[in-house]
Amino acid sequence: MKCFRDPQCALIALFIALLLVMPHSAALFSALFPQLPRPLYQQETFIGLTLAHFELVAISSLLAVVTGVGAGIVVTRPWGNEFRPLVETIAAVGQTFPPVAVLAIAVPVIGFGDRPAIIALVLYGVLPVLQGTLAGMSAVPAAVQDVARGMGMSDGQRLIKVELPLAAPIIIAGIRTSVIINIGTATIASTVGASTLGTPIIIGLSGFNTAYVIQGALLVALAAIIVDRSFERLAQRFSPHRHEQ
C-alpha cells in the first residue's frame, strides 16, 4: 500500500501492469476496434520491445551526456573558450537535422539496425546537455571560485569539488530534456530495423491499425513520464535549497 501513496512508485507499478496485461488484452481492443481483424500487436513481446527501447535510449543518452558535458567543460576552460562558438554551432546544427534525415543518410553507409538510430539520437540529444552544462558552469559565482583558488585548490579540484556540484542542478535539467527527447524520438528507429516501442506504432500507421498505435504510444508516453519524474527527484537532491526546507 505504501507504494501507491508514492506517485512515482504507482506509475512504475502501472507501467509494469500494462506490460503484463497488454498481451492478454485482445478482447478489449477487439471491442474498441471491431473493424480490425488483428487489434492486438503480437509479432514481438511488449516486454522485449520495452527492454530494447530503453537499451537504445540508454546507449544514445550516455554518449550524448559524455559528449555534451565534456564539450561544455572544455569550452568553459580559459584554454578552450575560443572554441565555444564553434562547439555551440555544431551542436545546434546537429539538432536541426530531422532524425529521419539522419537515418536516411546513415543507413546506406552502416546498414539497418541500432547503429544508425544511435547516431541520430546522439546528434539530437547533445544540444540540451551542452546548453545545460554551459549554463550551469557559467552560473557558478566568480567569488566562489576565487575562494576555492585562495584555498590552494588546483584547476581540477575546483572543477570537481566546486564547479560541477554547483552546476549539477542545471546540468541535470539539460540531461533530463535530452533523455525525454530520446525516449520519444527512439520510436522512429523502428523504420530502420531497430526493435523499439515504436515498432507497433510504425506498423499501425502503415497498416491503418489504430489499436497498434495506441498500444505503443501508451507505453512510450508512460515511460517518458516515469523517467521525467525520476529526473525531477534527482534534481531535487542536488538542489541548493534542499537542506533549507
Image (cartoon, rainbow, N blue to C red):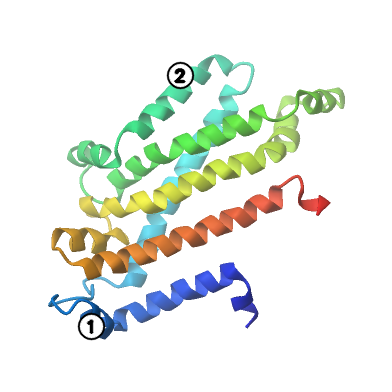
Q: Position of residue 203 (x, y in %)?
A: 19, 62
Q: If the image is split into quadrants, where does the C terminus sit?
A: bottom right
Q: Position of residue 164 (x, y in %)?
A: 68, 37
Q: Position of residue 232 (x, y in %)?
A: 60, 54
Q: Is residue 37 above or below residue 115?
A: below
Instruction: Tell whether 60 sits left or right of 73.
Output: left
Q: Disc 2 and disc 1: Cα gap in Å?
A: 56 Å
Mark 1 residue element: helix
**Disc 2, disc 1: CB below 8 Å?**
no
Q: Residue furthest right?
A: 151
Mark 2 residue element: helix
Q: Is residue 22 above or below residue 172?
A: below
Residue 31 bears which disc, if any? 1
Question: Which residue is pictured at 46% across the width and 40% down the height?
Answer: 64
User: Residue type at mark 2?
Assistant: Leu
Q: Which residue is mark 2?
A: 86
Question: Which residue is pictured at 61% across the width and 23% down the height?
Answer: 76
- Label 1 environment density (alpha carbons within 10 Å; few <14, some 14–19, many ≥20): few
Q: Earlier in the sequence, mark 2 or mark 1?
A: 1
User: Residue type at mark 1?
Assistant: Ala
